Image (cartoon, rainbow, N blue to C red):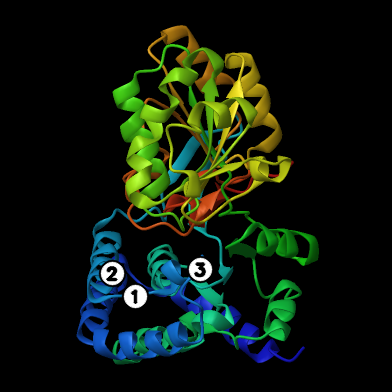
C-alpha cells in the first residue's frame, strides 16, 4: 500500500495522544487559533492558487473561497472548541452487580479518524480541532481543488504541534490523488472510521468502496412544505433564508412544496428571491400561477429530475401537493434525510410533520439554515450525519467518542 507509512505513523500517534491532559489540549488549540490568524495572508495566498484553477460559476467555488473574515471565524471556532467541556472519561453508566463486580461505561476516543472531503479548506481546521479535543488522530484526504489551501493549513497545524513538542502525525494530510483515497478506504487495522464530506457522488463512492466503517454526512436534498395554514410573512422569510443565506451548503433549500389551495400566495412567497436571481423550476400548476408574477428569464418548467436534485446554486424546484399526506409522501421519496421543514399554524399538522418525517433535523416554522453544529450549541462540527447508527445530525465532540466497559473485581470468577 503506497500510503501505508502515513497510517502506521497515525496509529502510533493515537497511543501517544491519550497521554495528553485537557489543559495541554486546550493550550495547543488556543495557540493554533492565534497561529491561523497570524498566518492568514499565507493561507489566502495559497487559497488564491486553488481559486485560479476553478471556474467562478462552479457550485464548489463558494465553499473553496476563503477571506480574512472566514479565517477569523474559523479561529474563533477553534477557541470555542477549546472552551467546551471535554467528553472524554465521562462515566455514562455505573453499577455494582450482585457478585460485587463494579461495572462502568466510560467515554473514549474513536482512535484514528479518516476524513475525505472536497473543496472545503475550512474542514481541515474543523476536523483537527474537534479530533484533537476528543483525543483522536485524524488522517485528512482533501480534494485536489483545495490542495494548496489544505497543505498550507496543515503545515501551520504541524508547526504548532512541534512547538508544543507533540507528534506532527496527530494530523496527516494525504496526497491529493485518487490512490490516496483508495488506500485510506482499505486501511483496515490502522483507521477506525471514515467520514466523507461532500457531494452525494463522493458519499456513495466511499460507502461502496470502504472496508472501514463509514459515517455518512453532507448531501442534503432539502424541502420546505408551505401548508394550507401557513403564514405568508413567516413563509417569505423562511424560504428566502433557507434558499439564499448560502446556496452552496447542504442545509440550503432545494424544493418548495406548496399546498394547492395556497397557490395564489406563491408569487408573494417567492417575491424576495427575485433580488437574488433565483431560478425556479415549477411544476405545471405552479408554473401557470407564476407566469405573470415571476420574471420570465428566471422561470422554467420542472422535469422529474428537478425533484431529486441538490442544486448548490441559486436554483429551486416548486411542487404543488394536494395536502399534508402528499407532502409527506413526496419527502419520503426524494429526501436525503438531512433537513426538512413545515410552515403551518395548525398544531396537529406541525406535530404530524415533526413525528413522521424521517430526517436528521426536522423544523416547524423555522429555516433549515440552522442545521449546523454552532447553531445547535455544539461548537464546530465535523459534519452532519444523515444516517441513524452512532450519530445523527450535526456531529460535535460527543459524536467523536465511543465507550468502553471497565470492570473492577476482587478475584471473582464465573
Per the image, the residue denoted by label 2 is 70
Using residue 33 as the reference point, say whether residue 197 is left or right of it: right
Q: Looking at the image, which residue is at 57% across and 78% down? A: 143
**Residue at 46% across / 55% down in the picture?**
249
Choose mark 3 or mark 2, whichever is in front: 3
Residue 88 drawn at (x, y percent): 41, 56
Q: Which residue is mark 3?
A: 60
> Would you say the residues marked 2 and 1 are in contact, meaning their CB atoms lie under 8 Å apart?
yes
* Residue 388 image offset from top left, x and y in percent: 63, 40
Q: Which residue is mark 1?
A: 66
Residue 199 is drawn in which quadrant? bottom right
The alpha-carbon separation of the residues under discs 3 and 2 comes to: 16 Å
Vertically, is 152 above or below 328? below
The residue nearer to you, when weighing 348 against 193, is 348
| Residue drawn at (25%, 60%) of the image | 80
Nearer to the camera, 53 or 124: 53
> At 67% across and 60% down in the image, what residue appears?
203
Mark-to-mark CA distance, 2 and 1: 6 Å
Amino acid at each position: 500500500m503506497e500510503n501505508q507509512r502515513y497510517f502506521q505513523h497515525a496509529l502510533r500517534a493515537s497511543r501517544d495522544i491519550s497521554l495528553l491532559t485537557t489543559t495541554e489540549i486546550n493550550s495547543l488549540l488556543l495557540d493554533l487559533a492565534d497561529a491561523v490568524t497570524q498566518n492568514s495572508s499565507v493561507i489566502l495566498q495559497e487559497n488564491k492558487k486553488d481559486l485560479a484553477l476553478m471556474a467562478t460559476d462552479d457550485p464548489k467555488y463558494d465553499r473553496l473561497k476563503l477571506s480574512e473574515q472566514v479565517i477569523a471565524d474559523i479561529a474563533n471556532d477553534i477557541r470555542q472548541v477549546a472552551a467546551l467541556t471535554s467528553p472524554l472519561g465521562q462515566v455514562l453508566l455505573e453499577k455494582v452487580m450482585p457478585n460485587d463486580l463494579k461495572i462502568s461505561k466510560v467515554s473514549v476516543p474513536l482512535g484514528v479518524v479518516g476524513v475525505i472531503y472536497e473543496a472545503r479548506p475550512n474542514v481541515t481546521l474543523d476536523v483537527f480541532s474537534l479530533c484533537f479535543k476528543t483525543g483522536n488522530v485524524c488522517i485528512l484526504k482533501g480534494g485536489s481543488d483545495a490542495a494548496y489551501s489544505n497543505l498550507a493549513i496543515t503545515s501551520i497545524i504541524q508547526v504548532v504541534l512541534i512547538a508544543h513538542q507533540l507528534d506532527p502525525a496527530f494530523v496527516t494530510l494525504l496526497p491529493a490523488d485518487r490512490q490516496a483515497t483508495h488506500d485510506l478506504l482499505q486501511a483496515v487495522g490502522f483507521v477506525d472510521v471514515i467520514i466523507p464530506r461532500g457531494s452525494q457522488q463522493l458519499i456513495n463512492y466511499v460507502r461502496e468502496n470502504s472496508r472501514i466503517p463509514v459515517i455518512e454526512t453532507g448531501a442534503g436534498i432539502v424541502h420546505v412544505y408551505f401548508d394550507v395554514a401557513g403564514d405568508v410573512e413567516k413563509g417569505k422569510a423562511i424560504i428566502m433564508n433557507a434558499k439564499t443565506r448560502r446556496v452552496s451548503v447542504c442545509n440550503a433549500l432545494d424544493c418548495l412544496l406548496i399546498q394547492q389551495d395556497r397557490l395564489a400566495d406563491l408569487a408573494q412567497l417567492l417575491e424576495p428571491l427575485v433580488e437574488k436571481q433565483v431560478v425556479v423550476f415549477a411544476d405545471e400548476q405552479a408554473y401557470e400561477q407564476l407566469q405573470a408574477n415571476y420574471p420570465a428569464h428566471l422561470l422554467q418548467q420542472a422535469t422529474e429530475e428537478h425533484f431529486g436534485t441538490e442544486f448548490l446554486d441559486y436554483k429551486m424546484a416548486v411542487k404543488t401537493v394536494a395536502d399534508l399526506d402528499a407532502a409527506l409522501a413526496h419527502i419520503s421519496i426524494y429526501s436525503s434525510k438531512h433537513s426538512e421543514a413545515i410552515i403551518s399554524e395548525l398544531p396537529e399538522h406541525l406535530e404530524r410533520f415533526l413525528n413522521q418525517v424521517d430526517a436528521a433535523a426536522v423544523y416547524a416554522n423555522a429555516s433549515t439554515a440552522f442545521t449546523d453544529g454552532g447553531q445547535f450549541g455544539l461548537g464546530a462540527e465535523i459534519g452532519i450525519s444523515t444516517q441513524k447508527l452512532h450519530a445523527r445530525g450535526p456531529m460535535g465532540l460527543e459524536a467523536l467518542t465511543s465507550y468502553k466497559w471497565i470492570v473492577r473485581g476482587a478475584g471473582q470468577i464465573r
